[in-house]
Amino acid sequence: MLDDLISVLYSVISENEIMDFIGDLVSIPSCHGIKDQETAVAEKIHDLFVKEGIESEISHVADGRCNVIARLKGTGSGRTLLLTGHTDTVPPYDMKDAFILKKDSGKLYGRGVVDMKGPLSCMIYGIIAIKRAKIDIAGDLIFAGVIDEEEKSLGTIDLLEKGIKADAAIVGEPTNFEVCVAHRGLEWFELNFQGRTVHGGAQKSGVNAILKASDFIHRTEEKLQPRIMNETHPIIGTSSMNYGTIHGGTQPSTVAGECCMSIDRRWVPGVKYEDVIKQYQDVIDELSKEDEQFKCTLKVMDSSLMKKGYVHESMETNIDHPIVNIAMEKAKEVLGHESKIAYFPAWSDGGLLSSYGNIPTVIFAPGDLKTAHSAEEQLEIRQILPAAFIYALIAIEICR
């Protein structure tokens, strides 16, 4: 029966057809600085769905930037599945001919080919395959191509605020077909240390902000880092923290009156965002009580701020949830081997869907995340058609 179903799906879509569409999407720049950024990509996807007789709409989010939402309606009251991913990309950076799809040694190259216009195309053609094959599903199958994941995730927030409902979701970030059931939460903090600027020859009358930053680092390493390492998750491992940048002072002969440091903080599911902030504020308060010259303010970096009421929350889905079991089962049926249950090493919109939408979510797609954002961004051609089949089979099972 399964072989018959795959044969039917195989008869209605082809690898070349999906590759051509990936090329179409890659050829449309959708990085920061492009007018209406992702809207042309949304329109291209919308036009394809309409051509295939699948209900679709362009949904304005902000500043001319639009999501695209498609729905393959079910025949009854089955479960609803959301297939989703972002239509924005990072800039070309040092990638040559970034918006021309290239094929070499069994791989596709181009900006967004793996992050994530390739996976999006596989999702889209998985839906189209079900439609072309006239396979009935009871529940609705929804596709959402969303804006802004690379910056503030306005697209997924808009989905949530407009009332998206689903029994399960798949986010198409590249996982090399691993079924990722969790990821860390993420925040970037900025710490500003204030000192007193004087000439280096009279340094005893000044307050060196760089030294105060050093005091903070020492105390954080001594007391906070062990606590962070004790925040554990059975799949992810531990929470983490990274000192990303530090800038202070103006010249060697002047006592630094200011020092600014940025921190990347990631936490495992179960840790509360408010507690993460309190951890740093407690260190600041402790040092302030010990040293009246210690002055420091903590804030979320502007580039990390999301819309009011939202943060980059962690994601976790129970490994016994149907979306996990079905994804594992269908991946094995198509690929011929077991996929791995894993965690996603970066942040994703899955954190919003699961934390704010209460939608059980997994991250699953072809491609290697390591090549994303790089000059060698790539997707293996041999993964494309299997990905579309897996998405289709998951949807048929979930929505039946």
Image: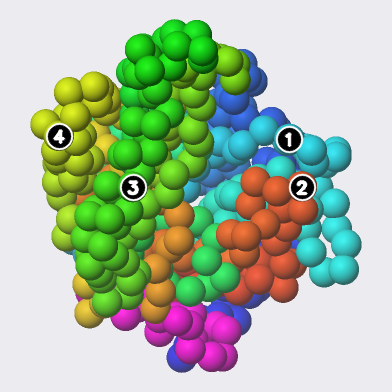
Left or right, residue 329 beside residue 300: right
- Residue wearing tag 1: 93
Q: Nearer the viewer, mark 1 or mark 4?
A: 4
Quote the CA–CA distance across marks 4 and 3.
14 Å
Image coords of residue 158 (percent x, y): 31, 31
- Residue 352's label in the rendered image is none
Quote the CA–CA distance across marks 1 and 3.
36 Å
Q: Are marks 1 and 4 in contact (CB under 8 Å)?
A: no
Dot 2: few (<14), some (14–19), or many (≥20) neighbours within 10 Å? some
- Residue wearing tag 4: 290
Q: Are marks 4 and 3 in contact (CB under 8 Å)?
A: no
Q: Nearer the viewer, mark 1 or mark 3?
A: 3
Residue 161, compared with residue 204, is above or below; it is below
- Residue wearing tag 3: 218
Q: Main secondary structure of the magenta part?
A: helix
Q: Nearer the viewer, residue 254 or 176?
A: 254
Q: Are marks 2 and 4 in contact (CB under 8 Å)?
A: no
Q: Secondary structure at mark 4?
A: helix
In the rendered structure, which amino acid carries the disc numbered 4? Glu
Q: Secondary structure at mark 3?
A: helix
Q: Which region shows up in magenta?
A: 321-340
In the rendered structure, which amino acid carries the disc numbered 2? Ala
